[in-house]
Amino acid sequence: MRVRWIPVAISLAAAVQLATAAVSDADRTQVYQTFRTQFDARHYQEALPIAERLVTLTEEQYGADNRALVNPLTNLGTTQYRLHDYPAAEKSYLRSVGILEATAGNADRQLLRPLHGLGATYVAAGQFADGSLALKRAVDLSRNLDGLFNIEQLEILEPLIACYVALEARADAEKEQQYALRVAENAYGRTDGRMLGPLDRYARWLERIGRYTTARLLYARALSIAEKAMGRGSVATVSPLQGIARSYRLEFLNGPEEENADSEPFGSGSLADSSNVLRLNPDGERALRMALQTLDRTQPVDHRRRGETLVELGDWFTSGGAFTKGVEQYREAWKELGLSGSTELLNAPRLIAYRPPPSSVTRSSLDEENSEEHFVEVKLTVTPEGRTADVELGESDAPESMQKSVQSAVRKARYSPRFENGEPVATTGVSLRERVLVRVKQPQRS
């Protein structure tokens, strides 16, 4: 009897077709809805296998390289990101981006979500260079598709700016900070309550680069908006009031915006000099007192924000040399933070007054072409009074003179001490790493 192989082959092919046809759009829609229910409820661990299942079903229905996989892969990547599984999230986002690049090119709107997710994943993992590339690409695409000042780009700009800040790319960070503020003003109007967030973010950046007066003007503008939009004494005024006080304190410690880079950080004396206390602008303390009064009138009491404001007030007194008053505020802050569920803010020393040496990356006038970057690591103890002790040099690849200048700067630094059970205690093994620029000798011309 002759064996007939052809019908068997046809049957196998039919079986494969039936298996593929077994996955329908209705099946995938049902799985997606189940996923969204868990994801929207923030049950990310429960949502993960459902997201993986949706990717598998889509592959079975459409193949491994079809555009239909883009959204399921992006949803999977976002779930992995929320679970802090950044390597897995990176893989999912990259695959989504790769499918779109292969099927639609670099100008497809669908690229926005996976690029944004990929960039945010890199930021969370500390890979700021990679993050800046993905996020800059997403911002450029957003502006090309939806206009230069579309409001949707703000959520991409925020992590992009964080990358530039981490990379010390000041020019790029400043450019995008200003752009973000203009986008918000264009969308909301200069006096709209929704301007509070963008104003606060830009003002904090200005603090970081030593432009304290300009930062204070933005905080004052935010305070005015909060009072008009939400009412005087509203909780929305607390953050601007804290910012006003902080800008005064930092300006006192580090000098005004046009300060000579070679001047001493704390004037002619130390932080303990009573003359320095008088130099602190009392408007800063008044601002913090106003913030505390606002929080005390608000029910229920926000213990977290009250604790944070008390820490700012403690920093205020400590910076002015009135450490005993500072400790009183820190003790009260400890209680408030404990009531909020976490005293993490006071569980470790915090650097509140430190002036890097002129050779540091943040102060040096050398450009990239004429300098090389090196580092100096310093080990120290922070005393219960917030002073530095046992300041010793650690690892370094910088010249000895620069090592000593960093060591000298650290000796003058002041910390908020670590607290245990509401009391300040000494902390050993604290480290500070400073990046410095060394001039490169230019070859002599013949």
Image: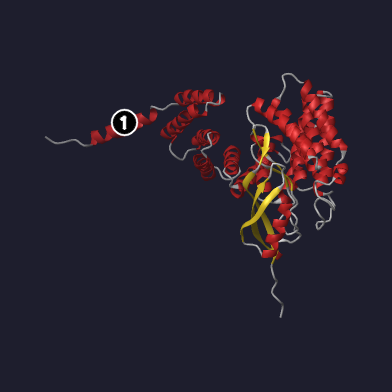
Q: Badge 1 is on which residue?
A: 15
Which residue is at the front of the view, 283 or 216?
A: 283
> What is the quadrant of the C terminus in the image?
bottom right
Q: Quadrant of residue 274?
A: top right
Q: Can you see residue 191?
A: no
**SS at mark 1 in the image:** helix
**Side of 307 where 276 appears, left or right:** right
- Quarter occupied by the N terminus: top left
Give the tally of numbered discs: 1
Vertically, is 220 above or below 373?
A: above
Residue 259 versus residue 30 in the image, above or below:
below
In the picture, residue 378 is in which quadrant? Answer: bottom right
Label 1 sits on what residue type?
Answer: Ala
Residue at the image point whose x is 43% and y is 33% from the top: 56
At x 84% / y 27%, what residue is drawn?
227
Residue 331's spot in the image, x, y percent? 71, 32
Residue 131 vs 335, above or below: the answer is: below
Question: How far across and down, in percent of the image, does residue 356 sit?
Answer: 73, 54
- Number of residues whose C-alpha sits closer than 10 Å to that of mark 1, classed few (under 14), some (14–19) or many (20 or more): few
In the image, 48: left or right of 391? left
Residue 58: quadrant of the picture: top left
**Horizontal side, residue 317 vs residue 307: left or right:** right
Residue 221 in the image: x percent, y percent?
84, 35
Q: Is residue 293 or residue 159 the one in the foreground?
A: 293
Residue in the foreground of this view, choosing between 332 and 228: 332
- Residue 279 seen in render: yes
**In terms of depth relative to the viewer, which is nearer, 334 or 106?**
334
Report the colour scheme.
Answer: secondary structure
Q: Position of residue 32 (x, y in %)?
A: 50, 26
Above or below for 406 versus 139 = below
